[in-house]
């Protein structure tokens, strides 16, 4: 399965829950997660999408740590079966 396919499934499942999942692009600040997940009720998280078994690059890991230190949730998604659990966890806080 390709990264693009997993990303499309994430976007669709977020939409089914009434949220949006825009692509996150930050010129001049490389390594940010691929998607911002915004769900009803003010829930927000960042999702790095990878092909199955693929790992985050060192810069991406550094950005994930920075976002987490700031209090945001960051997930690395490499299997579409993880999507439901990730969305449930985002809404559980």
Image: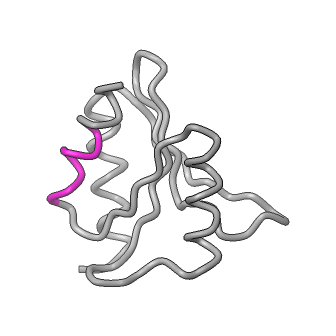
Characterize the magenta stretch by its predominant secondary structure: helix
Figure disc tally: 0
Image quadrant where residue 29 sits: bottom right
Q: Could you tell whether 26 is left or right of 68 in the image? A: right
What residue do we see at 54% from left, 40% from top? 72
Coloring scheme of the render?
Answer: one colour
Residue 21 x/y as whole percent:
46, 43
- Extent of the magenta region: 81-87
Q: Could you tell whether 10 is left or right of 29 in the image? A: left
What residue do we see at 53% from left, 61% from top? 34
Image quadrant where residue 88 sits: top left
Comparing 89 with 1, the one in front is 89
Question: Against 51, is 31 above or below?
Answer: above
Residue 35 x/y as whole percent:
51, 53
Q: Quadrant of the N terminus?
A: bottom left
Q: Quadrant of the C terminus?
A: top left
The verdict on residue 83 being magenta is: yes
Question: Against 83, is 80 above or below?
Answer: below
Q: Could you tell whether 81 is left or right of 61 in the image? A: left
Residue 45 x/y as whole percent:
47, 41
- Report the residue that reaches farthest toward the top: 41
The verdict on residue 38 being magenta is: no
- Report the residue that reaches farthest toward the right: 28
Q: Could you tell whether 52 is left or right of 25 in the image? A: left
What residue do we see at 59% from left, 71% from top? 60
What residue do we see at 21% from left, 62% from top? 80
Residue 20 x/y as whole percent:
45, 36
Question: Against 91, is 85 above or below?
Answer: below
């Amino acid at each position: 399965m390709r990264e693009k396919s997993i990303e499309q499934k994430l976007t669709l499942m977020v939409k089914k829950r009434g949220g949006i999942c825009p692509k996150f692009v930050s010129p001049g600040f490389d390594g940010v997660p691929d998607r911002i997940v915004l769900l009803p009720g003010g829930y927000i998280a960042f999702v790095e999408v990878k092909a199955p078994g693929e790992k985050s690059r060192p810069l991406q890991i550094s950005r994930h740590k920075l976002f987490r230190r700031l209090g945001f949730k960051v997930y690395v998604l490499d299997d579409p079966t993880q999507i439901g659990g990730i969305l449930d966890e985002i809404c559980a806080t």
